[in-house]
Image (tube, grey):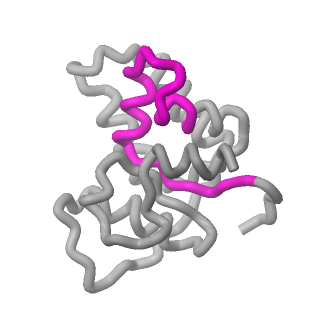
Amino acid sequence: MPAMKGKIFAVIDTNVIVSALLSSNLESNPVKIFRAIVQERIVPLYNDEILEEYRSVLSRPKFHLDRSLIETVIKAIIADGLSMDRTSATDIDFPDPKDIVFYEIAFSDENSFLVTGNTRHFPVKPFVITPAEMVRILED
């Protein structure tokens, strides 16, 4: 991974992106995380499966998100982030198999985080953190 001093590398779970886009509170933790991505303080880690998950979930009719907004978000993640290969995480049970890719991408870099609002869906590991924990890291 290229050295990017002072940058935080993180896989952002879909629920954090959804929360940021739906929130009317500009000081909510998901909004702060998304703002940190745009400000290039967080480097989002992703692969094609994660991008497809973002696109699929954000396109759900219940969220009423404009297609152009969804594409802008995806383009920002690609422009500001790093595409990564998965590192297989064996002997771990995930309640939702779609979550495995998020974990495995974060697991691919020992200096990265997985930011999720659903920590119970992942193994208890120091790199699996909540949006509130990420905001504390950003503020330190």
Q: Nearer the viewer, residue 7 or 133?
A: 133
Considering only vertical position in the picture, is 12 above or below 71?
below
- Range of magenta residues: 7-33
Residue 117 coordinates in the image, percent (x, y):
35, 46
Q: Is residue 120 above or below residue 39?
A: below
Indicate the position of residue 15 as horizontal and vertical percent values: 34, 40
Q: Which residue is at a point 53% across and 24% down the rendered structure image?
A: 27
Does the magenta segment cover residue 77? Answer: no
User: Where 76 sits versus 13, above or below?
Assistant: above
- From the top left corner, tell me how far across and down residue 46 is, in percent: 52, 54
Q: Residue at 73% of width from left, 53% of height from top?
A: 7
Q: Quadrant of residue 72?
A: top right
State the image quarter where residue 99 is shown: bottom left
Q: Residue at the spot x=17%, y=62% of the render?
A: 95
From the image, which quarter does the N terminus lie in?
Answer: bottom right
Q: Would residue 95 appear left or right of 138 to someone viewing this image? A: left
Q: Is residue 75 left or right of residue 49?
A: right
